[in-house]
Amino acid sequence: MTLEVDVAHRLGHFTLAAKFTAESGLTALFGRSGAGKTSLINVIAGLLRPERGRVAVEGQVLLDTTAGVSVPPHRRRIGYVFQEARLFPHLTVRQNLLYGRWFTPQAARREKLDHVVDLLGLAHLVERRPAGLSGGEKQRVALGRALLTSPRLLLMDEPLASLDSARKDEILPYIERLRDEVRIPIIYVSHAVPEVARLATTVVLLSDGKVEAVGPVAAVMSRLDLFPLTGRYEAGAVLEGTVAAHDDAVQLTTLAAAVGPLRVPRLALPVGSPVRVRIRARDVMIAVQRPEGLSALNLLEGRVAEIAAGSGPIVELRLDCSGETLLARITRQSVERLALAPGKPVYAVIKSIAFDRHSLGVAGSPHGEE
Amino acid sequence: MFDFTPDEMTAIRLSLRVATWAMLASLPFGIAAAMLLARGRFWGKTLFNGVVHLPLVLPPVVTGYVLLLLFGRHGPLGAFLADRFGIVFAFRWTGAALACAVMGFPLMVRAIWLSLEAVDRRLEAAAQTLGAHPAWVFATVTLPLALPGILAGMVLSFARALGEFGATITFVSNIPGETETLPTAIYTLTQVPGGDAGALRLTAVSVVVSLAALLLSDVLSRRVAARLASA
């Protein structure tokens, strides 16, 4: 699957001028509120007609303003999960789920109701009406409804934004399953670093209507120059590893990662499962000698690769740990006291409890890019 | 006292038939006009709005007379419809239904218009992304969501038709068995000696039927509203 987008549109004082291509997997359109993310996917869906632009999926042109082509939304076969579930209140959950199926050409119907109901855990809801569902349940039904049209591409506009954190955790695994099992290409709009770090294959970073960076999630998230845009507080390196062992006596799991073993709170995943972890820069301490008598369980060896320039009290460091990137935020005073400079060997210290459930997720299978 | 004379029964039956036809025949036009007012953006919308509401403010006699001029046997529309489709309004019960439909039209349109404006356009966009052609979106999302207003509009039109007097009597006169509806029958009875008992009986029927219609509409729209309780 290839999605090509090239759009220019003016809305009052705001100018959207974005161009990117997305391949299979989950592409996160990431940026602050007002960066133009929703406008951009509305253009892809056909709900917003830009002043100038071109959108093509798998080579089929859906929009080309110079050629006067604009396929209406109902003929684009692009699924859309909105921020508010937008379920039809006059229909039952089953009728909502099947709504789009009527309109899907017979030959294109890949998804079956039973399969989608299983996949999203909706079996106990199908006879109910949307009004009685929780926010998380509504969003799962909306996901199933879009999926049952057998779309070639799924757009998701901050589907978790209106949910509390427990409901978010309820939905995230389902989105991971869509990405890894259904293998449907997803364009996922979000301004939340944890979601993007956990779900994205590729990140398109938007700022003020422009594309600032495109690349694999680990690469974009570890660029110090993008910190002002990715958000300093949540910023951190994204690493992939596998579950190596569980230690039930102390309720910890050991992950095998390129940076070395990581001890994290016990995960409910079988040994060998691929996982993705985000290590927030603010959770990483730096030592120049191997520290003794520390409570922290993770000690990684590496070198300082880059020190971000700046004048504030806090400095961001990029570390090279066995070829992987790790980020750290420490005070300028510490940088001076420890005489940190690019190339200097250091130890990165990370508490196990820094790995909370918001920073751990199932990674796509290694062959997810096929 | 409720031994209706055959003439009274005829008037009751005729009134119900006229009101039912007036309501049903004006419904598609009412929905179309409400849709134009709620969603349309066109030149002359204010004027269109005014024309739709005209029967509400004009003296009914004037409306009836205009209908007579337009739909009478020699009126431009009346002659055309009679020659082409064999539809005659003048001095027929169909004319009474037309007069009632026109008089109830603004009430029907207002009710439907309001409920169409309350329909969440975002649901319509969602239906489009699910592959529904705009016409299907209208039929499967917009109309069902506007149903409370449509029911209310139908009942208002029906109730207005039961009470219509001025336009009817001007347009199609007061012919027993053809155009003599409840109000005109009551009026006639009050004009003849000894007609009081009959007038009273028909008045009671009017009250009961109108009240029943209103109660029914209330029950229906409550049921629909409960079903549509915002998701």
Image: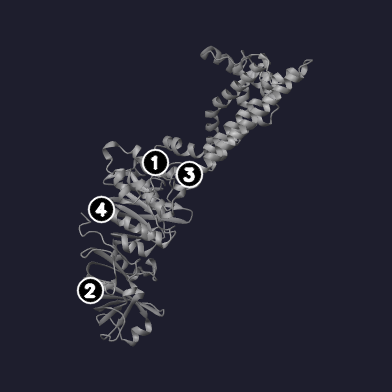
Q: Quadrant of the C terminus of chain A?
A: bottom left
Mark pair 4, 3: CA separation: 33 Å
Q: Amino acid at mark 3?
A: Arg
Viewer-nearest residue: A288 or A332: A288
Label at residue B11: none
Please say if A120 is above or below A200. above
Q: Is residue A5 left or right of residue B226?
A: left
- Quarter-of-image position of residue A221: bottom left
Please say if B218 is above or below A270. above
Q: Badges 2 and 1: C-beta atoms under 8 Å apart?
A: no
Residue B78 percent across, percent down from the top left: 59, 16
Q: Badges 3 and 2: C-beta atoms under 8 Å apart?
A: no
Q: Is residue A132 left or right of residue A259?
A: right
Are discs 3 and 2 both within one chain?
no
Circle nearer the viewer, 4 or 1: 1
Q: Amino acid at mark 4?
A: Glu
Q: Give me the chain letter of mark 2.
A: A
**Which mark sits nearer the N-terminus, 2 or 4?**
4
* Secondary structure at numbered mark 2: strand
Pointer 1 residue: A95
Residue B220 percent across, percent down from the top left: 55, 36
- Quarter-of-image position of residue B110: top right
In this rendering, does residue A152 appear at all? Answer: no
Pointer 4 residue: A181
